[in-house]
Amino acid sequence: MSEPKFHGRSGTWVGASVRRREDPRLLTGQGRFVDDIHLPGMLHAQFVRTAIAHAAITGIDLSATLRVPGVVAAFTAADLAVGDIVAALERPAEEFALTAMPVLARDRVRFAGEPVAIVIATDPYAAEDGVDAADVDYNAETAVTGLSHALADGAPLVHTEARANTFLDVTMFATDGIDAIFDGADCVVQVRTHSGRQNALPLETRGVVASWDARDDQLLVQTCSQVPHQVRTVTAACLGVQERTVRVTVPDMGGGFGIKCVVGREEIAVSAAALRLRRPVKWIEDRRDALTASFLAREQDYTARAAFSAEGRILALDVDVVCDMGAYSCYPFTAGIEPLMATAEMPGVYRVPAYRARGRAIATNKAPTAPYRGVSRPQYVMTMERLMERAARELGFDPVQIRRQNVITSFPYSGINGVTYDRGSYRESLDLAEQILLDEGWYGYRADAAAAGRAVGIGYCCFNERTGYGSESFAKRRMTVVPGFDISEVRMDLTGAVVVTSGTINHGQSHETTMAQLVADRLGIDIAAVKLRQGDTERIPYGWGTFASRSITVGGSAVAMAATRLGEKLCLIGAHLLGTEPDNTRLDGAGGVAACDDPARRIPYEEIADVAYLRSHLLPKGTDPTLTATAVFDGVGDGTFSNASHAVVVECHHGTGAVEILRYVCVEDCGVVINPQVVDGQCRGGIAQGIAGALFEEITYDDLGQPTGGSFIDYKVPTACEIPDISVTHLQTPSELTESGAKGAGEGGTIGAPAAVLNAINDALRSTGTELDRTPVHPQDVLAAFQRSDVPA
Amino acid sequence: MKPAPFAYHRPGDLADALDRLAELNGQGEEVKVLAGGQSLIPMMNFRLARPAHLVDIGHLRDRAKLSGLRPDGAALRIGALTTHHEVERARLPEGYEALNRAMRWIGHLPIRTRGTVGGSLVHGDATAEWCLLALAFDARIVAESPAGRREILAQDMFHGFYETEVEPGEIVTEIILPAPAPYAALTEFAQRRGDFAIVGVGVRLDVDPSGMLSSARVALGGVAPAPVRSADAEAVLTGSVPSDALFAECGKAAAANVSPPDDVHGSRHYRRRLTHALVQAACAQAWKRSKENP
């Protein structure tokens, strides 16, 4: 194998905070999002949604709807007669229950907000008037609104197929003799954690414009999805048409965070309506529906025990994870995704010699869930880090010291969970985070505050995150739909400019910038000469979209490989035109091919392109015309692990119970940093969402299954006023498993923040005798902790 | 989140607006006056409010009469269409500075630049800053109708959940704050900047030449369906010499006689605790002004 012409690990572009190439258009209002699309004769859709959480549908009367001025059509499930959305695992029936999500509710409704009918009108106002006029009769049944209710004997069933309301029940690991280890250990600590139900809350709600194109013999589905190819597959399957007759494109996209990496039912219903009416139909999810009737996330309970030696070494870990998945299993991941992630990954950065893990996915009459940024990791990391803190207290260790004693320091490391961890900086990141707080004097500040009667606390979190999952590692989850690879095509035109495709989807991650940086370095051209194309099933080779921090690790590797191959072709043709051997040429970093033994002998890409396209008779024998290359990359082995340590200082205020974050330090390692500013943004945005989970956001349900949080009054997404400045420091342990040496950077912030904030709060409350293990922590929880420790008045 | 159908009216002047209101009310129609719309329009978009008619008074030819701040002897008259932001930025007469400071608690800047003083008072949200200020300042709210003009005392204004003394045919034209209140403060707590307060408190201390409190107002928001005064808290203050201990006792008294709601924003117990802490804090802030403006 020849030396790489340009390796991209350090180059002109990689490693620089190149300005985001998408910003000029986005900041000047020239972005094009789904709602910016207007087609001639376009109609507008809204959904009749049940207000009752659990019921049999006994009648649907849309006659009044159809009389509303402006309403063009209204369809029920029976009218549309499309197939269900079904996601499966290859697991035995005692482990996994196969259930279906109908596009529109047919006989039963399973959560408040579930769509029952679609109303199509000439404008969005008339569509809502039509929704108002719909008359649906229900026979209400008892709603299952929580885990304990769902698992109780004789509980009503959300799906008859899911016995005991259990979508999934697996015991993933059970080390022989683990009970004896617990019996004999010097110290056993236990924790029960709970994390509230959240909404991933992309700024742009879901939406779609579907239109029939007779000339293309195609239904064009323009939607904001992280996974356009999977949307195409499900749309074609539900509609019962050939896949070639469905084209899915993704315009600019205002966030997804995971709720758009599953296939939603509304998009299919709109597509079915557009197909039937042969008119363009737009649906823009309104914020109320986005908050309560979309895909939610996160609600999980952990019961975990850890055994420790007197010296502070963890000996065994035993965890029972129960996830409240809501009413339906999402495509393609299934409701199993959360417990399977948690049980597979929980040991994390620590050397855990014995492990037992049971994971369950439970059905309830709540809005279904999708894998939100972090996917169970915020929860299991919070649980693991609570165990560490508790053990430190129990054994009299400093919380950082006990982590230091247990983190993995030699790599590759084969974990008890059967996962091989590639090199990381677990210990180094922790040491550095602590050092930053020491240098800034926060330990002294905490002591002084305590002396003045104030409650200031310091909390840490140390974690890793598997990124760049390939088909091999996803296959271990035993889905019937196994993501993994990504394909990239690169094409150079006559001017030496390049268009590169990726099966990933940019929805805020700056792919147009970072992917272009990779290509520019591989080909030695200016970034301005590179254009990334994504999000079009007609023009982009089959791909898996963006989730699981796979864009740069998998997609970026394919992009870099394709660019490298194009470079090889340039050398091949260039050598021929220069009259030398290909081995004696290299890309010269200035848009040309040069002879190695005489760099003054060079030929610019434009001249090579001229031959490749316009004078192909001059090409070397056996070389195809045009300048294109394709590469496929699949995640290698167990993937590559990013890591980080977070350190947080909080003050808990007497009087109001408010938690104020005084300092937030993140030391992260995502391998080679392609664009520091972009990674900083990913960290800060992720941490903001993690803080949201720790302190602010939660959707709760009453006994009837009615959700709170139908507006931003109740669903308390924090704003810039509530999120502190966050310092981000990068350590760089290059990955051996990706083309660029980068590891995924998309989710880490979200993963670490809840644990770090919660640990800091518990440190601040250490004199109260109360420990909080539920998020979000509300001011009233803090005030109650203070009050319990007050001398009775 | 699109409103139900409604008719939009844009009368030419105040008299026209009052006639239109009378006419529509006479027909038994549900009418709402649009005066900023920062609460009404979101409620309509959620279809929680479904007025058949909106009478927009934001474009009256004589709207100047309903706008701005006018000192009138010791009193301060504030036009109903004055925005929160205008008050926030206004150079206020001596003794009214608390109004400037209170404005920053109202929503966010975009809300303050459109929302109006009169609109807020008539909406009557239990946590609205203007309602607390009206109670703390003993304000008089001026309402006009074709039958004439009347003044509503703040203490008679707020009846219940979004219910006020203002009749369907009336338009509030101004609010009169009768006297300066150099020792006044408004404070509140919410988890996020700009949110509706979980509990809000407006306080006015009247200090006599001997340094004793001759009277006091303690207005509470978020503890009842409507904004309320705490007679017990006011009684603690009246006739006493200000001190931290007195303010703590006042907070305790305020908390003892409220029965606040219990919801996702805070339990009944938590709101009581907040009432205690915030009344104490508001008293201290109001009193601190006496040291800043001797």
Image: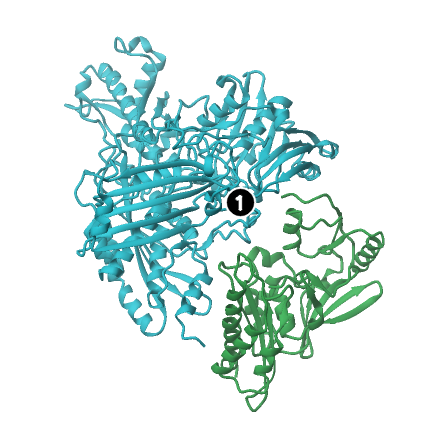
Chain colours: A cyan, B green
> The N terminus of chain A appears in which quarter of the rendering?
top left
Few, some or many C-alpha atoms within 10 Å of disc 1 (few <14, some 14-19, many ≥20)?
many
Quarter of the image for residue A792 reads bottom left
Relative image position of residue B279 (x, y in whole percent) = 53, 73
Q: Residue furthest front?
A: A153
Disc 1, SS: helix
A142 relative position to A443: left or right? right
> The C terminus of chain A appears in which quarter of the rendering?
bottom left
**Pick the front one: A357 or A130:** A357
A551 relative position to A399: left or right? right
A335 relative position to B80: left or right? left
Res. A173 visible in picture: yes
**Pick the front one: A737 or A162:** A162
Quarter of the image for residue A483 reads top left
Which residue is labeled 1 in the image?
A291
Q: Residue drawn at (25%, 18%), measured in percent from left and top? A: A574
A273 relative position to A580: left or right? right
Q: Residue drawn at (36%, 22%), measured in percent from left and top? A: A491
Quarter of the image for residue A421 reads top left
**Pick the front one: B165 or A614:** B165
Q: Chain of mark 1?
A: A
Q: Amino acid at mark 1?
A: Leu
Identify whether A161 is placed above or below A460.
above
Identify whether A530 is placed above or below B177.
above
Res. A743 visible in picture: no
Identify whether A20 is placed above or below A726.
above
Question: How many numbered marks have been drawn onto this rendered protein structure?
Answer: 1
Relative image position of residue B175 (x, y in whole percent) = 69, 69
Relative image position of residue B67 (x, y in whole percent) = 69, 64
Relative image position of residue A581 (x, y in whole percent) = 18, 16
Q: Residue furthest left?
A: A597
